[in-house]
Image (cartoon, rainbow, N blue to C red):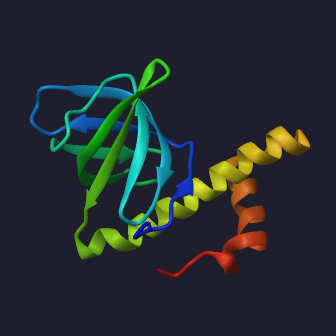
Amino acid sequence: MREFIRHPASVPFQLEQLDGELKHGLSTLNNVSFGGVSCLSSDPVEKGKSVKLRVECINPDFEVTGKAVWCRIKDDLYEIGIEFILSKDKAFLLRMIEQICHIEHYRNEVLQNEHRKLTSEEAAREWIDKYAGEFPTS
């Protein structure tokens, strides 16, 4: 059984390996939870390596460090599991990231299912009205 609930996501972010060997370009979050993320990247990350994730769609940019816990090939990309290394002050910001991921997922679903093109702000307002009360507090 999972310790943390995984949430679907499709939010772009920057992934950087902290040992300086490899800098990744833009990657995409696949799933996000309070404990970590899985993401898709064009470059692999070796298990145990420290990484920094930077989400730029938040102002100011959100950065968090983590450790690669697994890496496997998925189609022509690498799916990487990253466990967060969180300080207490980052925990609140991480909850905001989870909500942003839900909102972006909602925006994509509306586009696919209803053919309505929402801005991120419009999607946020609709998602908050519909789902914010159900969003887990921990």
Residue at screen point 40% across, 51% down: 37
Among the 4 quarters of the image, the one containing residue 51: top left
- Is 126 on the left-hand or right-hand side of 14? right
| In the displayed structure image, the side of residue 88 where residue 11 appears, left or right | right
Residue 43 lies, in percent from the top left, at: 31, 23
The residue located at (77%, 72%) in the rendering is 129
Total numbered labels placed on residues in the image: 0
Residue 117 visible in the picture: no
Residue 9 position within the rendered picture, expressed as x and y whole percent measured from the top left:
56, 48
Q: Quadrant of the N terminus?
A: bottom left
89 or 121: nearer the viewer: 89
User: For residue 121, which quarter of the picture?
Assistant: bottom right
Q: Is residue 82 visible?
A: yes
User: Which residue ends up furthest to the top in the rendered image?
Assistant: 76
Closer to the camera, 77 or 21? 77
Q: Pick out the residue farthest to the right.
A: 114
Q: Nearer the viewer, residue 62 or 11?
A: 11
Q: Position of residue 81 (x, y in %)?
A: 35, 45
Q: Residue furthest front?
A: 1
Q: At 64% from the left edge and 49% from the top edge, which residue is drawn?
A: 104
Q: Is residue 137 above or below residue 11?
A: below
> Who's the residue at 28% across and 73% down the image?
89
The picture places residue 107, in percent across and down from the top left corner, at 73, 48
